Amino acid sequence: MTERRFNPEHTEKLDNPERRKVLPPEKLLELLEIQDNDIILDLGAGTGYFTIPAAGLTNGKVYALDVAPQMLQYLGKRVKEEKLDNVELIEGAIECIPLAGQIADHVIASFVLHEVEPLEKGLQEMSRVLKPGGTVLCIEWEKKQTEQGPPLRHRIHSNELAEAFEENGFLVEKLTYPSDQHYLIVARACAHNC
């Protein structure tokens, strides 16, 4: 586990009432306009904060990727409890996603891109697995000191990340600030060069 990776022993931080109030997963998923048979890839799926509600919005496959086996075990139990048959757990890193190209209609990257080294590799992998015109929902910590979240040196400023998306084959359609600590980007994979 690199210094940037989330410690799986702190799962309670990933899913708590306070986070749900500020970042309600069902409401945020509406930004992706998920259709009946869309295929979704949740990067750094963790406890299933987005995986579980996303699986209820599509009959298509929801791939839940995480680098930590403990997280996938936890999520696997939740998937069974919820009786979801369209979730597939995948162990792997964002820098080398173990999926075929152009497989996903949507990618969710919630609080994980600050862990990716190098960032460009992660964005290129996201672009590779997305179908042309597919969308990304990205949520990150703004690059400023806050009580919670990763160290300041690991954070990516919202404008910097938006620029990195554009430099790696995406069109940024939305950049908003759901709280003073977080930002949200919706980006679309360009069918051709943007």
Image (cartoon, rainbow, N blue to C red):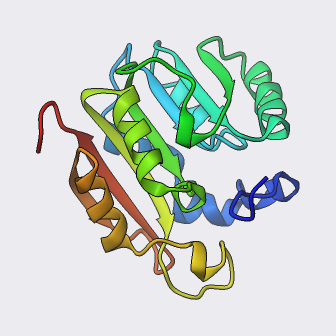
Residue 42 position within the rendered picture, expressed as x and y whole percent measured from the top left: 54, 36
Q: Quadrant of residue 78?
A: top right
Rendered residue at 49%/47% (across/down)? 109
Left or right? Give the position of 68 relative to 185. right
Residue visible at 12% across and 33% down? 192
Residue beneath the point at 37% across and 16% down: 36
**Residue at 80% across / 53% down in the picture?**
11
Horizontal placement of 184 versus 191: left or right? right
The tally of labels here is: 0
Question: Residue 80: image x %, image y %?
Answer: 78, 19
Q: Quick check: can you spot residue 28? A: no
Q: Is residue 183 left or right of residue 165?
A: right
Query: Between 30 and 74, which is closer to the camera in this rendering?
Result: 74
Q: Is residue 58 at all visible to an observer of this figure?
A: yes
> Would you identify the image quadrant in which residue 93 lies?
top right
- Name the quarter where the C terminus is drawn: top left
Given residues 139 and 130, the one toward you in this image is 130
Q: Position of residue 58 (x, y in %)?
A: 45, 19
Quick one: 32 or 166, which is closer to the camera? 166
Eyeballing the image, is 22 above or below 135?
Answer: below
